[in-house]
Image (cartoon, rainbow, N blue to C red):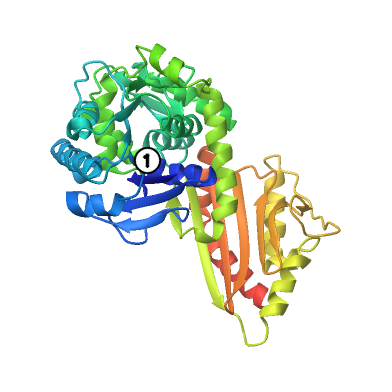
Amino acid sequence: MTLVIAGASGFVGRALAAHLAAAGNEVTALVRTPGSAPEEAREETVDLTDARATAAAMRGARAAYYLVHSMASGTAFPELDLRLATTFGQACADAAIERIVYVGGLGAAPSSAHLTSRQEVGTALAAAGVPVVELRAAVVFGSGGISFEMVRYLTERLPMMVCPRWVRTRIQPIALRDLLAYLEQSLQVPSGVYEVGGNDVTTYRSMIEVYGEVRGLRRRRIVDIPWLTPQLSSYWVDLVTPVDRKVSHALIESLVTEVVVTDPDPAAAAFPFAPLGVREAMRVALADQEEAVARTLFERTSGLSDGIYTFTTELAVPDGRADAVAADLHRIGGRFGWYGSAPGWVLRLLLGRLVGERLRRHRPPAIEHGALVDWWQVSRAEPDELVLRSVGWFPGEAWLGYRVEDDRLHQVAAFRPKGISGFLYWKLLTPIHRIAFARMARRRLRG
């Protein structure tokens, strides 16, 4: 069927577009910024405050997903969210949309502006008469979700942390994979409000501990400071994590409210599957990110995003050398010279031995998917493209990719630090990495 996603450029929206398209649906993404739609969707640039334009962009679709929030706009976001939801509901009625599916927020009688707004939006969407399926959820576990990223950065970067009282507030997180299943099946269930969550009720304190265990980090020491208010703790989160401050402040304000499923029966009857628990949801989130990085490596831009540092290099290939450069990608393995700075890599391997690494040179019979090459495993091998993933690196996971296209060489290096040692490894060696990556790219042009 033809489906519309409002908020398709966000964390859940992008994942949902890919999920629905993979199931054979035609997906239209309503976005504010041209070029920001997921590649799996047809893009419609529209201002959601314009009901007529929004209705025109949705005409012909059967159902619409509403995944919009305005927390990044500042403290006046509840008023803006309410206005956008009212307009969107009317636009859906004008476009003859059969149902709206909306992700709201859990919480009984919430005191925070964020959670109150989430529930008011559900009511506003239904005001024009279009049936609404409202999924009330808490934290969504997946790379890119702001709550998950807060847990990631705090745990990875701090071997000891001072925590406020809200880390003991009960919460029922849900895996992104499970939320996508709920969203897809919402096209078939009776309209109404459904409380959905994962298989475990937990706390932020426990999530920090479990994340450390899943990631293989040493146990984090947590000291509770009861008088540390949400506002003061939000400044502490700003200091440690690079997440959007306006959004994180609104979320932290809401952490004094328990967000757990209080009425599980409607969802259990309508959605016949068992969601994941916290530990497995974290494992899935990290594994899904690894697969996504390998798949989309050449689409990444330099900088830090969702816990991963990326460094890109692009060079012009000399005339007549494109085929030779591409062919050289399949001669990797067994020699340090391929990487452009043999002494540097020898030193890197020797230093790694001091912390338990046992990296060795190795050349397989063929450069193909899954083959082990030196301290890498081949994630993708095409005639003009090579993507490698590190094996056995102590500071974290690394990816290295090359693509020869339009007489240009694209080199992308990505790194996901593991713990404070991985973070310091990247930060302290950044100047050396810049030199090394430049030499590696130039070495490829020589073949």
Q: Is residue 25 above or below residue 319?
A: above
Q: Depth check: 334 or 253 in front?
A: 253
In the picture, the quarter occupied by the N terminus is: top left
Say whether residue 217 is visible: no
Rendering coords of residue 379 (x, y %): 68, 52
Residue 354 appears in the figure: yes
At horizontal 21% and vertical 32% (from top left) the residue drawn is 129
Q: Is residue 400 above or below residue 205?
A: below
| SS for dot 1 | loop
Q: Residues within 10 Å of mark 1 (few under 14, many from 20)?
A: some
Which residue extends farthest bottom?
A: 319
**Residue 35 vertical position relative to residue 114 in the rendered view, above or below:** below
Q: Where's residue 222, x and y in %?
A: 42, 22
**Which residue is nearer to you in this view: 92 or 239?**
92
Find disc 1 in the rendering and name its residue: 241
Tally of marks? 1
Residue 420 position within the rendered picture, expressed as x and y whole percent measured from the top left: 50, 39
Query: Which residue type does callout 1 highlight?
Result: Thr
**Residue shown at the point (71%, 52%) measured from the top left:** 376
Quadrant in the picture for residue 190? top left
Instruction: Say left or right for 173 vs 325.
Output: left
Query: Picture quarter containing residue 140?
Result: top left
Q: Quadrant of the C terminus?
A: bottom right
Foreground pick, 197 / 256:
197
Write down the quadrant of residue 354 in the picture: top right
Q: Name the residue: 44% across, 56% down.
A: 303
Q: Residue 152 in the image: x percent, y percent?
A: 45, 35
Residue furthest to the right: 365
Q: Is residue 396 left or right of residue 247?
A: right
